[in-house]
Each structure stands twice: as structure tokens, then as C-alpha cells.
């Protein structure tokens, strides 16, 4: 399946995307994770992206479109993929139409009032990228690989507000864009992780049938 996951920052897209990719055996393509990898590797792209990401703004469309187009052309993506965090603007969504035919777009819906608490409690493993929330943390280290947990620079309060503004202005219009194409599946993301996962898999089953 060729899928896109939409939703505000902190909606649980990344967590759900990883679970769905495991179940469907498709690669998880997270543009945010790819940009963070570039930052960690100290590449030119990483240096430019970090300055932008730290403000909560979006990396230029042509840069992300180029990264995704290249990735989707790789053999690993031949039998499907899940795009998490892309597209984030109408320009990106229109560009994607030129090189992908999507089966479904899953919109993980979480009320705006719940987002800040979800993001400020998020902790990420520095080694494997697995995401946790302080309210349900079982250990001080990552339960997947033992790595150290930290807060993403762009999850700090001063950046979160801007990320939410950027989401409202630039990414939210994609809900209507995909609804008009009749491939949008909206799932209530304001439930326990397993319940959200169940709702997503049920919605995807109907698309596959
Ligand atoms: P995420 O991990 O999806 O929350 O992304 C973290 C940050 O990476 C965003 O706030 C943007 O600065 C940047 N980013 C990720 N995906 C995109 C995209 N599709 N377009 C532009 N910037 C992006």
C-alpha cells in the first residue's frame, strides 16, 4: 500500500506509522527523521535544515520534494510505503501526484487543545528514534534499544507554538485536498495507542478489500 499519514505535530503519527509499517511490511518514510539524520551526520543539508527546524518553520518545498522523490524511486519502496510528515504543503502534495499514486491518506485527528501537552511530554531515543511520553515512561532509557532519551530541540515550548501555526496555515488545508480526492480516512487520535492503531488498521482493511 502507498499511504500518507497526516496530522498535527504530536498527534502520534510517528508512533502509529511505525506500528502500521511493521504490520504491512512497508518502509516508514519520515521526512523529519531523514532531516534529523542529515543534521546528525553534519551534512550541508543538515546544517541548513537545523537552522530552519529550530524555529518551527518548514524546510523549503523543493528540498523535501527532492529527498522524497529520490527515496520513493528506490527498490525498497517498489511495493509500497508510508509517508509520515510529507506532504506538508499544497505544493508538496501536488508534486507528489507527479510521482506517486496513493491508496489512502490517514488523518490522525487530535483536538488542538491536547497538542501542547502531548508534544511537551514527548521524549525520543537518541539511538533508535523511538518515541515515548513522560506520562507512560517505563524506564529512563529506551525500552527498545537501551539508548538515552532526550527532548527534541523543536519540541521545546518556544518552538511548539510556531509549529502549530505552521500546521494550521500550511498543512491543515491538505485534509480538504485529499477529502476531495476521496482517499481521506480520518481516525480519532485522542485515544490510547492501541485503540488508535485498531481504528487505523480497520480503516485500511476496507481500502484493501
Ligand atoms: P517532524 O519530525 O515530522 O515533526 O518534522 C520536524 C521538522 O522537520 C518540521 O518542523 C520541519 O521543520 C521539518 N520537516 C519535516 N518534514 C517536512 C516537510 N515535508 N516539509 C518541510 N519541512 C519538513
Image (cartoon, rainbow, N blue to C red):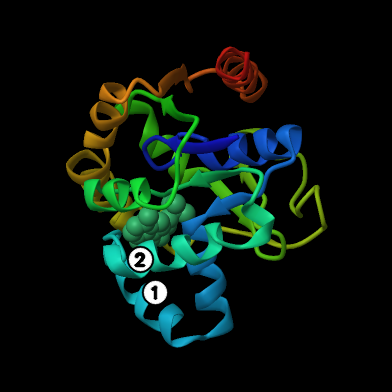
Q: Which residue is mark 2?
A: 53
Q: Secondary structure at mark 1?
A: helix
Image position, residue 132 (x, y; %):
63, 43
Q: Is residue 156 visible?
A: no
Instruction: Using residue 120 as the reference point, say whether residue 177 is left or right of it.
Output: left
Instruction: Using residue 136 as the reference point, say whether residue 69 is left or right of it.
Output: left
Residue at horizontal 66 percent and vertical 64 percent from the top? 126
- From this view, report whether residue 109 is shown above or below residue 164: above
Image position, residue 112 (x, y; %):
30, 28
- Disc 1 crowd rating (10 Å Cα; few below 14, some 14-19, many 20+) is many
Instruction: Using residue 199 as the reference point, say whether residue 167 is left or right of it.
Output: left
Q: How many marks?
A: 2
Image position, residue 37 (x, y; %):
57, 71
- Disc 2 crowd rating (10 Å Cα; few below 14, some 14-19, many 20+) is some
- From this view, report whether residue 57 is shown above or below residue 11: below
**Tags 1 and 2 in contact by the CB under 8 Å rule?**
yes
| Residue projecting furthest to the left | 169
Q: Which residue is mark 1?
A: 50
Image quadrant containing the N terminus: top right
- From this view, report whether residue 86 is shown above or below residue 43: above
Q: CA distance from mark 1 to mark 2?
A: 5 Å
Q: Is residue 193 visible?
A: yes
Numbered badge on residue 201 = none
Q: Nearer the viewer, residue 50 or 94?
A: 94
Cβ of mark 2 under 8 Å from ligand 1: the answer is yes
Quarter residue 65 falls in: bottom left
Amino acid at each position: 500500500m502507498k499511504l500518507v499519514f497526516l496530522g498535527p505535530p504530536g498527534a502520534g503519527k510517528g508512533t502509529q506509522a511505525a506500528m502500521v509499517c511493521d504490520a504491512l511490511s512497508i518502509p516508514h518514510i519520515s521526512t523529519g527523521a531523514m532531516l534529523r539524520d542529515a543534521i546528525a551526520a553534519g551534512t550541508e543539508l543538515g546544517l541548513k535544515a537545523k537552522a530552519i527546524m529550530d524555529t518551527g518553520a518548514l524546510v523549503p518545498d523543493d528540498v523535501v520534494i527532492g529527498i522524497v522523490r529520490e527515496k520513493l524511486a528506490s527498490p525498497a519502496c517498489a511495493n509500497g510505503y508510508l509517508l509520515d510528515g510529507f506532504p506538508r504543503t499544497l505544493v508538496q502534495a501536488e508534486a507528489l501526484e507527479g510521482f506517486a499514486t496513493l491508496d489512502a491518506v490517514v488523518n490522525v485527528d487530535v483536538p488542538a487543545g491536547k497538542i501542547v501537552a502531548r508534544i511537551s511530554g514527548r521524549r525520543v531515543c537518541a539511538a533508535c528514534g523511538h518515541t515515548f511520553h513522560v506520562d507512560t515512561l517505563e524506564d529512563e532509557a529506551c525500552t527498545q534499544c537501551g539508548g538515552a532519551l532526550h527532548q527534541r530541540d523543536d519540541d521545546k515550548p518556544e518552538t511548539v507554538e510556531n509549529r502549530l501555526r505552521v500546521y494550521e496555515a500550511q498543512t491543515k488545508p491538505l485534509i480538504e485536498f485529499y477529502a476531495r480526492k476521496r482517499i481521506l480516512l480520518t481516525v480519532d487520535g485522542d485515544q490510547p495507542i492501541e485503540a488508535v492503531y485498531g481504528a487505523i488498521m480497520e480503516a485500511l482493511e476496507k481500502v484493501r478489500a
